[in-house]
Image: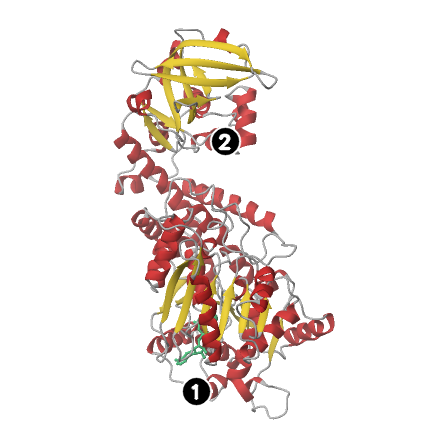
Amino acid sequence: MDDALDRVLDARSATLLAGQLDVHTVGDLLRHYPRRYADQGQLTPIADLAAGEDVTVVAEVRKCGSRRMQRKNGTIQHAVIWDGTRELDLTFFNQRHLPEVLTPGRKALFAGRVTRYGKARTLQLTHPRYQLLDGDADQLAEFARPLIPVYPATKDLPSWTIQLCVRQVFDVLDDPTDPLPPSLRAAHRLPELGAALRAVHRCDDRAQIATAQRRLKWDEAMAVQLTLARRRQEASSRPAPACPRRDGGLAAAFDSVLPFTLTAGQREVGELLAAELAGEHPMNRLLQGEVGSGKTVVALRAMLRVLDAGRQAVLLAPTEVLAAQHARSLRAMLGEHGRAGELGSAEQATRIVLLTGSLPARDRKRALLDVASGAAGIVVGTHALIQDRVSFADLGLVVVDEQHRFGVEQRDALRARAADGTSPHVLVMTATPIPRTVAMTVYGDLEVSALRELPSGRSPISTTVVPVGEKPGWLDRVWRRITEEVAAGRQAYVVCPRIGGADAVGEDTADEDAAGEDGERPPLAVLDLAPRLEEGPLAGLRLGVLHGRLPGADKDAVMRSFTAGEIDVLVATTVIEVGVDVPNATVMVIMDAQRFGVSQLHQLRGRVGRGSHPGLCLLVTDFPEGSTARERLGAVAATTDGFELAQRDLELRHEGDVLGAVQSGRRSGLKLLSLLRDADLIGQARETAQRLVAADPGLTGHPGLARLAADLLDEERARFLQKI
Ligand code: ADP
Ligand code: MG
């Protein structure tokens, strides 16, 4: 399976496969699975073709001629093919010798896009690729099979060329060794690897193909789950910085001044965390909880336990805005307990240090010193912090907030951060609900807990789609609504997908998946809209602007004035997506809402309705009713159940993106396995992997499995290393 392809194939095919499909070895090619299978019988009828489809037809050439083009230089070739039922026109350009190849009576496969042309709107294929079928009899037989595999292809490597390459590989290949142990295959009734590969590439029976695919999915699921099981095993077998419970410490002092009653969920999770922090092995836990469910307090209480044990805690946030806000709110919550070294601090107070990339050099140096000396008990910073060489005096706990852009590898990097050979406890928090299969893969190295209730006194958020395409007048009503809220003493957000000006690509813009559907008009930008609102419909209100290109200090100042109520309306990009907490903000208007993903919209609207006043979220779009974009917005408007939306989001996205964005690229690791459809299989593989690794952590008894996992890891490492 490791054999280089040029030992089996001609040089041209090998080069094309390597260059265009990243297929280098025999194994790579055999794992380049058909995307689907076409029935020869259903393929053929030209009568069934419809404009716009990409089709492959088997047909006989009736005639083919060439002529000069009338207005331009060059030649044009017309051919007519016939499949026994109907004729179809083909058009080619500048292939003067084509009539010598496509002679009447020759049979060939033709593949291309069906278009209409001329007054009669006749169907035709323009510049199709073709493969003659009267080569050797063997080839003909290959294409005459009832089921034709359709491969992910490129312009120079059409599906049928790949099919022939695969065929050639099978002719010389010895059966590969099977990584799955016979007992596992027997338990789940899985065919052997060789048989499965043959079936998936060259088989005429859909049921057999499905069985083969299930077997190949097991390979993928086991590779992922073994890797994760070993990570869990490794992470939890390291010694942890011990943080035993202590009476009369900071944690206890904080609890006694807490201005509200903890929800049952907060208390329960708090107990669990306290127990895990006191244990001998590191905690590795994911805390899920809807926006506003009060995760920060839970994290703070855990951090205080760690401080009580004489160690440090770090809180990582995805953006500088959020880091600054966290530092502020932790300071506010801790009060006198957070002002060590200052006048009026409590006896056993700690110090909170904010560490972000935009700190002036001198402040940064001092902050780093405080962290290294242990003077700072709590360090708050951006995720980017881990890429710097911050050294801690005694790091006990890492809290990662709003972590949906933070992968397994990054968590591993953090775990390597503690002193004295221990691994810090890790608490990851996210408001994006995670479907079960994603939890088992992307977050598979973590145990999961959830906060399911919101603190009492929360107000509901209602969401409405504002279809300005059909109802242009509604936009005025949107601005009027903001004016009314401000008059009533409230505040509002207006979110745009783009910063504007000399837009830098990749900066806090909307989700790529959702974007680009309209293509024509550039999405609305903060820097364009804000002045228009200021002069127009929102004249007289105090507007502020917030986006990722502002210097850190400015961002912070804007957030501060918004929090203080000195700004009425904040026009912003998605920098406010996560964690920003201004209870007096009640309205959020999202412009070009179709540009955002489902989860992102859900996150965004969680910024309003955080106080005692009901929240309102307006999704402004000019996309027409019936478009998928509108469907997606409708789904967001219809429910505030984050779990339901997360599932929906998974359905609407490319799974590769879900994995790729969060984890350092599993793209090539998961080809057949679907997070959406294979939940049961993934669950079974997880159990199996857990059992195998518990009994044999090095997998020495299962070299095939060890190899499967190692291949995946290699790939992942390679990708991760490319990123930093
Ligand atoms: P999230 O889970 O979205 O991070 P936060 O931790 O930011 O939520 O909490 C949102 C707000 O709710 C904060 O202002 C916090 O002080 C407040 N809060 C947290 N827990 C409670 C509670 N049990 N009762 C009342 N308010 C709470
Ligand atoms: Mg939060």
Residue 154 in percent (x, y) is at 50, 29
Residue 117 in percent (x, y) is at 43, 24
Report the residue at 44% width, 7% height from top: 103
Q: Name the image quarter holding residue 350.
A: bottom right
Q: Above or below — where is 232 with respect to 62?
A: below
Left or right of 289 in this view: 340 = right
Q: Name the image quarter holding residue 88.
A: top left
Front-most of residues 623 and 720 = 623
Residue 464 in percent (x, y) is at 38, 63
Front-most of residues 443 and 52 = 52
Left or right of 399 in this view: 355 = right
Ligand 1 image position (quadrant): bottom left
Instruction: Report the amino acid beneath label 2.
Output: Asp
Q: Name the image quarter holding residue 110.
A: top left
Toward the right, the furthest residue is 362
SS for dot 2 = loop
Front-most of residues 351 and 457 = 457
Q: Earlier in the sequence, mark 2 or mark 1?
A: 2
Residue occupied by mark 2: 2
Circle nearer the viewer, 2 or 1: 1
Mark drawn on residue 259:
1
Toward the bottom, the furthest residue is 344
Circle 1: is it few (<14), some (14-19), or many (20+) Cα within 10 Å? few
Residue 399 makes an appearance in the image: yes
Report the residue at 27% width, 30% height from top: 206
The Cα–Cα distance between marks 2 and 1, rounded to whole angstroms, is 64 Å
